[in-house]
Image: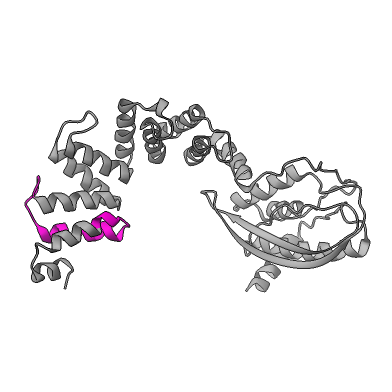
Amino acid sequence: MKGRISVIASFLLSGCATSYYNPNITDAGALERQRIIDEGYCTQVAAGSVPMPEVRHYQSGIQNYQITGNTRTYGSDGYSANSYYSGNVTAYPSSGDAFSAGMANGMNMGAAIRAGQERKQVMQGCMYSLGWTTDKHATTTLTPASTKAKTQGEEFFEIALADAEAGDPKMQTRVATAYMEGKDAPKDLQEAIRWLDKASAQGYSEASFQLAYIYSGRVDPQYADTQMMLLSIQKAAEQGEGMAQSMLGSMYYSGSNGLPQDTGKAIEWYKKACGNNDANGFLGMGTLYALGHGLKKDPIQAHRFFTKSEELGNPEAAEYRKMLEEHMTEAQIREANGL
């Protein structure tokens, strides 16, 4: 299958052939061998059959080494999946190490994230990542040993930041998370709040919910603000965030965090949370049915809600279900299980 895709991609790219040069490999034979290997691989990248490779770094001096491609596909959340490819080549003396690693990183990440761009651009991004250039007169540049290579997370943060500045609420939230956790960016809660406010204003519920987390004081006690936390939870719930909806239901049920005790409101928000497949929403509804609070006592319905909550990953629901079964008949348990 990969072979067919490569042939099709080669045909599509043949009308706009590009000559590539690699100033890091001075031996003509080695250069041609490596060009064939890399163009073959990048043709498959352009066709979408294999992921974009990481930037290849060259070492100065005579090097006998195996080309091992640790390829990485980036997801929208910043996580990645790895695969590998290989080939052998001898690199002869050159005046330095890899060419512009920054540009290669940008092309690599950009092509990986914006996979819908034209095949020619993807092909070029792949070749740039592997040390090739379209500039026939390019020379290598020495990368100081003291220069710290960027981590995958730092590279992703730069791309996410650009998308955030362009107004993408999802990326604004990812950038805020990096600032909030101090990973891949310096920890800065003010910056985190600034980006979350932008995303929240666009209706992005995850951002509103993260604001509530910051104002809970769990990240930094200095930012604890009960009123702002409640407002953020309410906003996230209204924007459709299931976890916020179940939390709001629990607050109304217990009359906490400045909200009045209101079982009717609790049921309303628990039902909305269930509609978003939130485990705590099902747990809340099961509890109300089990106790007969605001609803007619119904152990069979309670059992079903607890079971659903358990299926969604809430271990507490399993304990509630077991306690409930101690007060149910075998016939009721069978009915609850649909038997």
Q: Residue at x 93, y 60 (%)?
A: 27
Looking at the picture, tell me which residue is in the foreground, 222 or 193: 222
Give the vertical position of 334 relative to 319 (above or below).
below
The answer to which quarter of the image holds residue 219 is top left
Q: Residue at x 19, y 60 (%)?
A: 321
The answer to which quarter of the image holds residue 240 is top left
The answer to whether residue 180 is left or right of residue 84 is: left
Q: Quadrant of the N terminus?
A: bottom right
Asked if one can make out residue 36 in the rendered structure from this viewpoint, the answer is yes
Start-end of magenta stretch: 292-317
The answer to whether residue 261 is left or right of residue 215 is: left
Q: Position of residue 19 (x, y in %)?
A: 83, 55
Looking at the picture, tell me which residue is in the foreground, 257 or 193: 257
The answer to whether residue 69 is left or right of residue 157 is: right
Q: Residue at x 18, y 68 (%)?
A: 337
How has the structure been colored for display? one colour
Q: Position of residue 164 (x, y in %)?
A: 54, 36
Looking at the picture, tell me which residue is in the foreground, 193 or 52: 193
The answer to whether residue 322 is left or right of residue 70 is: left
Q: Is residue 298 magenta?
A: yes
Q: Position of residue 199 (x, y in %)?
A: 45, 34
